[in-house]
Amino acid sequence: MSKRIVVAKFGGTSVADAVQFRKIREIVESNPERRFIVVSAPGKRYPDDIKVTDLLLTCYEKAAAGQSFAAEFEQIRQRFRAIIDGLKIDFPLDSELETLRNSLLTEPMRDYTASRGEYLTARIMSKYLSFTFVDPAWCVCFDQDGQLNAPMTSRTMRASLLPLNRAVIAGFYGADMIGTIRTFERGGSDITGSLAACAVSADLYENWTDVSGLYAADPRIVENPETVSYMSYRELRTLSYMGASVLHSDAVLSASELEIPINIRNTNKPEDPGTMIVRHLPKGVTKNPVTGVSGRKGMSLIQIEKVMVSDGSGFSALMLDILKERALPFEYCLTGIDSITLVIRTELLAPCKEDLFDEIRETLNPDFISLRDNLSLIAVTGEKATESSDANVRVLEKLTEEGIEISTINQGAGKLNLLIGVPEDRYEDAIKAIYAFRQSHQAS
Ligand code: ASP
């Protein structure tokens, strides 16, 4: 047996039907290091399709409201039946579904119901691959308040998985101390994959999905953007925070703590190398100063002016205390000699704006407060920006050349990323301009 261990997680589109299951078998069999397989529930086969988890949740909601859930239940049955028949395997689907139906009729439980998509998928996959089935109810441990108990999960998962040669683990759920099923947030099978990778000290965590890695820019704005071959965990977190989504952020956090590389791969194009997410770039890999660009619309910019904000009297600290008291998160805060600039999501600010401004006036007695809505915030991410110190300056030049107003700029000393505020109606133009700048660096 090979000593290297790869944990491979397959997302909803990768297990959407029997054809996808076959692709997975080829992928798994092509590398014996892929010993632990984590699966989601069947996702969408085409844009208007319904994910099995959504069907299950509708069953739960209807059952809890005392309504009939027969139509959705039948759709779930048909999806699994088609997979089982397509793979030509024996599986006791009807008795499994009967258990679920009984629970819905007697005592509907949201998390238990939602988890059955992953449970059935993993059981079917383990049968199809002839791998051992591991139910995360035995080894993904939640506390009574529904929070993951990470240390206990790590120990229990390690003890459950390592003695096994090969196993399929259902994603998305676990159980608390009294055995009640608990789920993660939506998209949480990524977290299960990452927990398994950490528990067995995997050499690699593969996350198989339906794209060949993380795009350097949003494909809805830039036509055919390049996929990034290498990026750091920090870069991924920044890009994801600002809207690029391919992996659950908690999954990145736990893998990065143990420095387990994550490889985003495409089940439909297994020949593509995908994106490698690592702590440090391997030697010899050269990187564009701009790894990627992402952003969000719907931002508000607040400017609070007071002579000598920065004189040590605690003005900024008081301002942040006000936000903390209100549990109002901010995207960034910049302090200058005579002013503080805050960027806050408009949807969070709007309901409390008047109140907040009154409190700021009373507590801080500022000279002036101004508010500007309809802004977008763009993150230009690149750990290598430091080595090409003029890159950030040239990004700004590029925006100016395009006639795009730069409303605010924030660059921390770490230079990991540059945050730029631009008017919302120029958001797409700005992303395109920055991506074009990135591509012009390709050859260097
Ligand atoms: N099946 C769950 C969902 O649809 C979890 C996952 O796919 O990761 O959110």
Image (tube, rainbow, N blue to C red):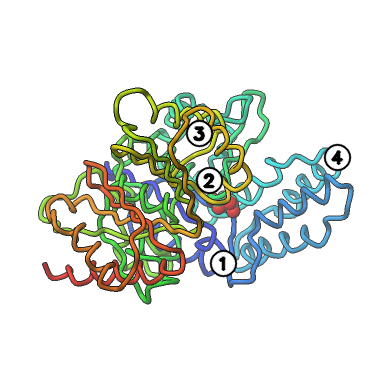
Q: Which of the marked residues, 1 or 4, is nearer the chain's N terminus? A: 1
Q: Which mark is residue 323?
A: 3
Q: Which of the marked residues, 4 or 3, is nearer the chain's N terminus? A: 4
The N terminus lies in quadrant: top left
Mark 1 touching mark 4, by CB under 8 A?
A: no
Q: Nearer the viewer, residue 136 or 359?
A: 359
Under mark 3, the amino acid is Leu
In the image, is residue 275 above or below residue 162? Answer: below
User: Measured from the top left, where is residue 57 in percent x and y?
Assistant: 71, 51
Q: Residues within 10 Å of mark 3 (few under 14, many from 20)?
A: some
Residue at (31% x, 65% y) in the render: 227
Q: Which residue is mark 4?
A: 106
In the image, is residue 412 above or below residue 143? Answer: below
Q: Residues within 10 Å of mark 4 (few under 14, many from 20)?
A: few
- Of tags 2 and 4, which is closer to the observer? 2
User: Measured from the top left, where is residue 83 in percent x and y?
Assistant: 61, 64
Real-space CA distance between mark 4 and mark 3, rounded to the nearest whole angstrom? 45 Å
Real-space CA distance between mark 1 and mark 4, rounded to the nearest whole angstrom? 32 Å
Q: Which of the marked residues, 1 or 3, is nearer the chain's N terminus? A: 1
Q: Which residue is mark 1?
A: 18
Residue at (11% x, 67% y) in the render: 444
Q: Circle 1 — which element?
A: helix
- Of tags 1 and 4, which is closer to the observer? 4
Q: Nearer the viewer, residue 410 or 185?
A: 410
User: Measured from the top left, where is residue 369 in percent x and y?
Assistant: 47, 43
Q: Which residue is mark 2?
A: 188
Under mark 1, the amino acid is Ala
